[in-house]
Amino acid sequence: MSKKDVFQKSGVILLLALLCTLLWGSAYPSIKIGYSLFSIGENDIFSKLLFAGNRFALAGLLVILLTWIIQKKFPIPKKDALSHIALLGFIQTTLEYLFFYIGLSHTTGVKGSILNGTATFMAVILAHFIYSDDKLNFQKVLGCIVGFMGVVIINLGGKVGSGFTFTGEGFIILAAASFAIGSLISKEAAKREDSMIVTGWQLLFGGALLIIVGALGGARTSIPSTEAMLLLLYLSLLSSVAFTIWTILLKHNNVGKISIYNFLTPVFGVFLSAIFLKESIWHWKNLLALVFVCVGIYIVNKPKVKNS
């Protein structure tokens, strides 16, 4: 069985996609704890960008180091993959988090979470126009709508707020678009270069740009504690593992089939935040949201019944 066949098996896709979204979900409470450990204020956007840049740059270095050990040679990207890797790092790492952090400071957390969930819709729609074997159909549209309802349900009861501002809600939508576009670029980059090399260099490049933006913006720096450094290391490890696996899944499967799993990230985020931040977890909306997301994933990935 070839590597491609392995990563196209339903069970393998399910387990790996669950691992990715679980890791990304764990970033929700970890980042909140990180802000406290690094003494980053709620509205200190540039310090948040510096924090994110350190996280992703370190993640990139870890992937590059691991690739070097596995392949027994320094992983230098092929020339025809360089532009894709640089573009991926700029859009999916730098731009996405730049838009997300600025946008979140000008809107409510509930709105931010719901609007960020539109990334899955965007990825599925973009794939329809780019790939002949990844067209929209009733099954995909229904699955996306059901899954998105899970994101809406889990945010019920929070402060939604009113109105629309370009630097608030607009930037969150641009962050979602950056992730969606990045998914397509990631798939193309992985066709030209090894998935680990793509992931390592795009994270390092995108993270370095975030560090520059944060530093130029006047981010406050302080000597971190051992606990703070360990947390940063965990965030970097989860990013390196999740992005590498996600890139591999996108390489071997349709974008729509994989992107639907991203609806699980905010759901896992709520559950893990409840556990680590001592919040109530057994609330009806949490469980109902999980059901909706799981049903949405099933609908999108349900095998079509062939007429005899």
Image (cartoon, rainbow, N blue to C red):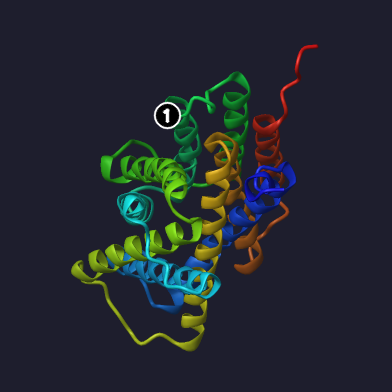
Number of numbered callouts drawn: 1
Q: In this rendering, does residue 187 appear at all? A: yes
Q: Could you say where residue 167 lies in the image, as x and y percent from the top left?
A: 27, 45
- Among all residues in the image, which is located at the extreme right? 308
Quadrant where the C terminus sits is: top right
Q: In this rendering, does residue 101 appear at all? A: no
Disc 1 marks which amino acid?
Ile
Using the rendered view, name the quadrant where residue 101 is placed: bottom left
Q: Could you say where residue 9 lies in the image, as x and y percent from the top left?
A: 71, 43
User: Is the residue marked by circle 1 packed among few (<14), some (14-19), or many (20+) residues within 10 Å?
Assistant: few
In the rendered view, would you say 61 is above or below 177? below
Using the rendered view, name the quadrant where residue 290 is placed: top right
SS for dot 1: helix
Using the rendered view, name the quadrant where residue 41 is placed: bottom left
Q: Using residue 171 as the reference point, say whether residue 128 is left or right of it.
A: right
- Among all residues in the image, which is located at the extreme top? 308
In the rendered view, would you say 128 is above or below 280? above
Q: Quickly name the residue at label 1.
A: 130
Q: Using residue 147 as the reference point, say whether residue 176 is left or right of it.
A: left
Q: Could you say where residue 96 lies in the image, as x and y percent from the top left?
A: 36, 51
Image point 45% across, 50% down: which residue?
109
Q: Nearer the viewer, residue 206 or 98?
A: 206
Q: Nearer the viewer, residue 238 or 217?
A: 238
Q: Could you say where residue 260 lies in the image, as x and y percent from the top left?
A: 58, 39
Q: Nearer the viewer, residue 70 or 66?
A: 70
Q: Nearer the viewer, residue 75 or 227?
A: 75
Image point 54% across, 26% down: which residue?
133
Image point 29% across, 68% down: which residue?
211
